[in-house]
Every structure is written in structure tokens, then in C-alpha cells.
Image (tube, coloured by chain):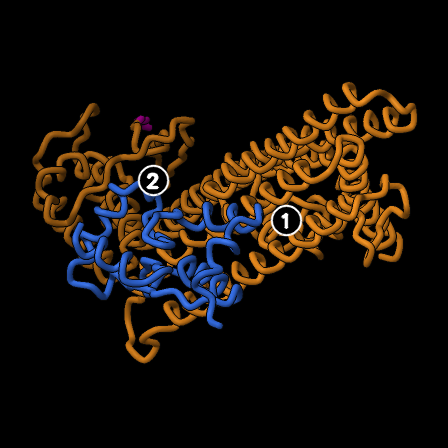
Amino acid sequence: MDKVTRLISEKGIVIFSKSSCCMCYAVNILFKELGVKPLVHEIDQDPEGREIEKALVRLGCNAPIPAVFIGGTLVGSTNEVMSLHLKGSLTPLLQPYKAP
Amino acid sequence: MLGLCLVSGKALWLLWFDNKGLERKHFPLPSSSVIPLCCPKNMNSSSAQFVTSRRMGVYDPIQQMSMWGENFKSNNNLNSSASLIVEDVKLDSQSEVASHGISGPSNQYDQEATKPVDKTQRRLAQNREAARKSRLRKKAYVQQLETSRLKLNQLEHELECARHQSSYMVGGLDAIHPGFPGAVNPGITTFEIEYGNWVEEQNRQIRALRNALNADVPDMKLRILVENCRHHYIELFRMKETAAKADVFYVSSGMWKTSAERFFSWIGGIRPSELLKVTCGSSQINVLGPQLSPMTEEQSVQVGYLQDACLQAEDALWQGMERLQQTLAETVAASQLIEGSYIPQMAAAMKKLENLVEFVNEADHIREEALDQMFRILTIRQAARGLLALGEYFQRFRDLSKLWAARSHEQA
């Protein structure tokens, strides 16, 4: 979907979220703790929200929110983010996007 | 003397006419059948019946009316209908008499015996009615007792089952907690039984690990034990995932654990960082003393990173939980000023509670991932030691719970 493609290429770290979703909030907190500021796109406040959700599912996101993209690539949902972090692979991914 | 016999209502009436006038004896019938009472409006249709008894000098209609009158709790009716009867009867003097022919003397009998008999009849009828009601009340009471007895048996049975189940669990004494859900939630009952078995198997595996380490068995044998242990923990996570669907509060509040374990419960289990501390023997808190084979520098660094990652993940997840609590509270409390139904708030709150399942599952996912990473970083022997330490850690807390519960019982 165009909008999704556009968004994920605009910013390094994008989280597709819903304002009511507390898990999305948790993932956002984690990224903040790691020193980055992701773009959080609330799809429940987006008129095209339903299409975005469908597109995310098509792209392979089970949840489908939160959907985390880093450098234009889908990382996954909460499970994947947590696993990556405990493996130690998340921090290197975020390195280019850390605030100096 | 003229002897007459009439079956009327519940009594067998024997009438003897003699010189002194009417003398009446009656013998109550065993049957509980009652002459059907009729509504005053239908008087005419049953007047023949009344006439019969009337002719025989039996004021059954009056008795029956008095009973009926009492049923409707209206003495006015009684009086008016009674007089109605009398009227009908007098008018119907020529109508057929049921089974026994009577001639003249019945008229005399009418006037002589009316008043005193009337009162007696009415009293007797009232007594009969009171007795009838009393019997009905007794019957209802007995039925209620029977129902309660059945219920009590059922509850006792359930309690027995619950106690039996809890005896599987090492927690034992303090396993019967208030609001014990096992009786009503089959998913939780299943979990509790399975968890009881899980703990037994866990204890067995701990013993096996201890023996193997003491006996200094080769790595190959240790690997098998370590793998078994690892799979055993994974099994617990699966069980919890299923149970969380049945009752998320049960899992998240750690109700399935013993009381001392519950004290440390974090979103339905041990904190992942704590899990690492125990298994990897962190230098800050060395739970088991210097039993671990010393870690290399590289290993220490990696464990350090893993520990940090765990803490960050925990922190993020916990803040999400707090947000969930906050929004749930706001949802439930919403529109308190508006009276009436709070169903919309409940519906929204229910949706929020479904998110709690996600959090419980995520917490377990972090625990599982932490264990996986630990196995990756440590050697087999170190992993075996770590698992032994972890198993004993839980075991000690279960024992602590038992001791504490026993102490509470002694003091009580």
C-alpha cells in the first residue's frame, strides 16, 4: 500500500499503532529507553486506517499492531521486537537512528 | 328411628332420627378428596348436591362455603353465599335427593338445628382449612429442605474434589485460596491438575540434575537432562497460555503459585531479570553460593547485556501494564454522572481486559527468550548448574510457603 510504503521510507523507525493499544505504548517506551524516537502512526486516527491494517497483515504482520519497521523493513510485532532485543540484535539495528 | 347414611366430603355422616330430635355422628373418611367448591355464581348448577346434604341435615354447603370463604379471605362472601345456599335450598325443596329418599321430617329438622350447628360447622371447617394449609406449608418446607440438602451434598463434593486436587500441588496447605475458581472453571481446574503433575516432574528433574552433577557425569548425559528441563519449562509456558484464555486474572495474579512465590510474582511469574540472576549466579546476588563453574569474561559480558535487555523489556512491558490499568479504570468510571445502565462502559472494559491476555503472554515470551539466550551463552555444565539453582529456588519458596502456612495454623 502506498501510504505504508511512503511512511516506512520516510522515517527510519516507524511503529504502526492504535491510540487505545497499550502494547503499542509498551513498545514505544522500549524504543525511547533505547535512545531512539520512532514515528508512531496511529491508524485509528487515520481515515485510511482499515486499509493500512490490511496492508500490514499482507506484509506479514500477525498482530497486526504494533507493527515495527526499521529502515523500511518489517521487524514484526511485540514478540519479534522483544526477541531481537534479548538476542542483542535490536540495539545494532537502532544505532544509525540514535540521537547524537 | 330412621337411620341414614351419606357420604359427604371427608366424612361419612350417619344420621339418626329419634325422639329427641336429630343426633348426628360423623366418621371421617381416609380419603383426602374434597367436594369441589363452587363459585357463588355457579350456585345453581350444584344446588342439587347441596340440597342433598342439606336434606340430610348436613350443612356441608355452609362448611364448604366457609372453607372457600376463608380461602378468599372474605367473610362477607361467606355470609352472603351461605344465605344464598339456604335460599337455594329452600326453593329447591322438590329437587332430587341423591341416594336416599326422605319425606316430611326434613322441614322440622331445618328450623330446629340451624343456628348452633351452623357455628360448630363453621368452626370445624375453619379447623380443617387451617390443618390443610398447615400440611401444605409443611410440604413446601420439607421440599425446600430436600433441595438444600442436595445442594449441600454437591458443595461438599466439590470441596472434596478441590482439596484432593490441591494435595497434588506442593503448595499444599495454602493452596485453597479464597475465590478458588477450580470448581467453576474447567480450564483452570485442568491447569491446576496439570501444574500439580508439572511440579512433581520438576522435583524429579531437580533430583536427577543434582545427582548427575554430584556424580560428575559426562556432558552427553547432562545435555539430555538439560534438554528435558528446558522442554519442561516450555511446557509450563504453553499451559499458562491456555489457562490465560480460561481466566487471565488467575494466571496474571499468580494464583497458581504458592503464597511466598506469589509475593515475587510479576505479570504471572518470575521476573525475567530475576530468573537470570538465579540461573547465571550474578555477582550481585549469588543465591546458591560459588557452585557455578566460573564464567569466562566473554560470558560475563554477554550475560550482562542479556540482563540489561531483560530489565529494559520488563520496564517497557510494565509501563504498558500500568497504562492498561489506567485506561481500564477510566473506562469503567466513565460517565458516572449519567444514571442508568453502564453496559457501554462494561463492553469497552471487556475489550481492555482482553489486552491483559496479551501482556501475560508477552511476559512469558520474555521469560522463554531469556532462558533460550541463557542456554546459548552458557556451557552445558553451567546450564545444568543454573537449572538446578533455578529449580531449587522455586522449591525453597514452595517450602517456605508451607512452613508459613503451618505457622499460621498453629497460631490460630
Q: Secondary structure at mark 1?
A: loop
The residue marked by circle 2 belongs to what chain?
B
Separation (CA) of disc 1 from disc 2: 94 Å
Find residue B107 and report its horizontal and vertical position in percent.
Answer: 18, 43
Residue that badge 1 annotates = B269
Q: Main secondary structure of the magenta part?
A: strand
Q: Amino acid at mark 2?
A: Leu
Residue B23's image quarter? top left
Q: Amino acid at mark 1?
A: Gly
Query: Residue at left 52%, top 46%?
Result: A83
Query: Of discs 1 and 2, which sits in the foreground?
Result: 1
Find residue B347 and report its horizontal and vertical position in percent.
Answer: 31, 58
Letter of the orange chain: B
Asked if one can make out residue A60 in the rendered structure from this viewpoint, the answer is yes
Residue B180 appears left or right of B302: left
Query: Residue at left 54%, top 38%?
Result: B188
Residue B209 appears left or right of B49: right
In the figure, A89 relative to B320: above or below? above
Asked if one can make out residue B14 in the rendered structure from this viewpoint, the answer is no
Q: Secondary structure at mark 2?
A: strand
Q: Residues within 10 Å of mark 2 (few under 14, many from 20)?
A: some
Query: Residue at left 35%, top 47%?
Result: A74
Residue B136's image quarter? top left
Give the camera-side residue of B18 and B364: B364
Q: Which mark identifies residue B22?
A: 2
Magenta stretch, residue numbers: B1-5
Q: Colour of chain A?
A: blue
Q: Which residue, as the protein is rendered here, is positioned at the far bottom?
A: B337
